[in-house]
Image (tube, rainbow, N blue to C red):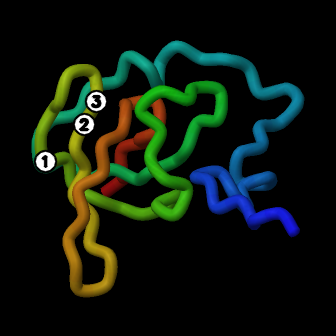
C-alpha cells in the first residue's frame, strides 16, 4: 500500500482554480498595508511565494508587522491566536 499524501495542497483542486479568462494583474503584488489593517486571506494560485496554508483561505485577520516583502497576519482560530506569514498578493483589504 502507498501512504496517503498529506501535503499542503491536498484537497485544493477547486480552491486553487482560476478562471480561464482571469488575467494576471500587477496591482495585488504592489499593494501596501499598514499595521492593524484588517485583511482577508485570498489565495492567488499564480504565485507560490509567501503562500499561506489553504486552511486559512477566507479568514480575516489583522496585520501585525511587515517582514521583508511579506506581512505577519494575526488570526483567531478557536481560542488560539495564530500568526500567518503571507505576501500581499494573497491578502485583500477588508471593506468597512
Mark 3 or mark 1: name the one nearer the start of the chain. Answer: 1
Dot 1 and dot 2 residues touching (CB under 8 Å): yes
Please state the horizontal and vertical placement of residue 38, each as a whole percent of the image.
Answer: 26, 53
Task: Tell me how far mark 3 sits from mark 1, CA to CA.
Answer: 11 Å
Residue count near mark 2 (Cα–Cα under 10 Å), binned few <14, some 14–19, many ≥20: many
> What x and y, as percent, mark residue 5?
71, 59
- At a point 79% along the width and 54% down the height, the residue shown is 14
Residue at label 1? 64
Secondary structure state at the residue bearing disc 1 = strand
Q: For mark 1, does the 10 Å Cα neighbourhood hold few (<14), some (14 to 19), or many (20 or more) residues?
A: some
The quarter in which the C terminus is drawn is bottom left
**Numbered disc 3: secondary structure:** strand
Residue underneath mark 3: 70
The answer to whether marks 2 and 3 mark residues whose Cβ atoms lie closer than 8 Å is yes
Q: Name which residue lies at 12% across and 49% down.
A: 36
Query: Residue 90: which disc?
Result: none
User: Residue 71: which disc?
Assistant: 2
Amino acid at each position: 500500500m502507498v501512504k496517503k499524501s498529506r501535503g499542503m495542497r491536498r484537497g485544493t483542486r477547486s480552491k486553487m482554480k482560476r478562471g480561464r479568462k482571469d488575467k494576471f494583474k500587477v496591482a495585488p503584488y504592489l499593494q501596501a498595508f499598514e499595521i492593524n489593517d484588517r485583511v482577508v486571506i485570498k489565495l492567488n494560485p499564480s504565485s507560490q511565494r509567501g503562500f499561506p496554508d489553504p486552511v486559512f483561505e477566507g479568514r480575516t485577520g489583522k496585520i501585525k508587522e511587515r517582514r521583508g516583502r511579506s506581512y505577519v497576519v494575526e488570526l483567531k482560530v478557536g481560542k488560539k491566536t495564530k500568526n500567518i506569514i503571507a505576501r500581499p498578493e494573497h491578502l485583500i483589504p477588508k471593506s468597512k
